[in-house]
Amino acid sequence: MSKLTIAVIGFLALGVASSGPVFAQQTPAAGSQQTPAAPAKPATGAKSASGGQASATPKTGQAAGAKRPATPAVPLKTQKEKASYAIGQNIGKGLQKDGVDVDAASMARGIRDALAGSKSLLTPEEAQAALTALATEVRAKQQIKMEQLSAANKKEGDAFLAANKAKDGVVALPSGLQYKILTPGTGPKPTATDKVECNYRGTLIQGTEFDSSYKRGKPVTFQVGEVIKGWSEALQLMPVGSKWQLFVPPDLAYGDHGAGQEIGPNSTLIFEVELLSIAPKTEAKPEEIKPEAKPDAKPSSK
């Protein structure tokens, strides 16, 4: 099987393409879904997974999610039959998941014609026009879905923060960041240019955990000014040895783009952050002063 064929099958098996996690920028990747070693600043213009680009699949009629008459069961005997069926299943699941409107019979015919080398029923121009129209339609639907999800997340997050700031021990800052001291510390406080070592756990306000250095069994090191705004602000207030719970509104986290598969647009996030240490600053060594070079040639005698 050629690399091109593998790539095509892989793309189709994933259905509508999605952008990957947007956590990491300068922090190393870790975790099962390329989650970074700390919540880095969100990439400009990044899209969350639910707002990815549509796959180019022609629209001809029935919605992917619509019920169709059951296909009579035919035993799959050979490895070829099983693999072929699995590819079709993955394509169908991807289309159904993303609400891509296709006609299964026409799609199957297109595959058969292509594999048999038969003449296409569409000219290249007609095929491209159909794919372009479908992509435009899917993007429009996804945009509406993202806007609705964004508004719902914002409303839910605002209500959560409004109730949370009235709880005992919760401090609300002018930026909108809220925190609660779980364990006080007595060490120094880092600056934006310092590198720090931390353990942390991140969850949605519903309780879903999306990342944890504790589970990886290893703390992370990063520059204070290179993480999301909520972290950067909080860390500069935290003495070494302290553990805080942070309640981060979306404008101090990943905004209306969200991040990865778990964090939707305009999501309010909760972090437990434990500041373990501040890395010592390294002083640049002064450049060695070299003596001026002596002229190679002797002055000519007259």
Image (cartoon, grey):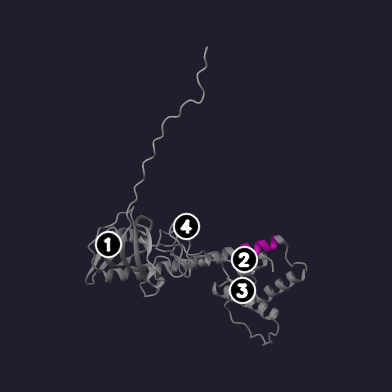
Q: Which residue is mark 2?
A: 56
Q: Residue 201 or 194: which is nearer the viewer?
A: 194
**What is the quadrant of residue 110 in the picture?**
bottom right
Q: Main secondary structure of the magenta part?
A: helix
Does residue 185 appear to the left or right of 18 in the view shown? left
Q: Which residues are magenta?
A: 125-134
User: What residue appears at the point 68 percent right and 64 percent down from the top-left corner?
Assistant: 127
Please tell me which residue is depicted at 50% across the width and 18% down the height of the picture. 299
**Residue 45, numbered label:** 4
Nearer to us of marks 4 and 1 is 1
Q: Secondary structure at mark 1?
A: loop
Residue depth check, mark 2 versus mark 4: number of the one nearer the observer: 4
Alpha carbon distance from label 4 to label 1: 34 Å
Q: Quadrant of residue 37?
A: bottom left
Q: Is residue 269 visible?
A: no
The disc at residue 240 is 1
Mark 4 nearby-residue class (10 Å; few <14, some 14–19, many ≥20): few
Which residue is painted at 42% across and 29% down in the image?
A: 292
Q: Amino acid at mark 4?
A: Gly
Residue 91: mark in rendering: 3
Mark 4 or mark 1: which comes first in sequence?
4
Q: Amino acid at mark 3?
A: Ile
Structural crowding at the residue carrying mark 3, measured as other residues with C-alpha within 10 Å and reported as few (<14), some (14–19) or many (≥20): many
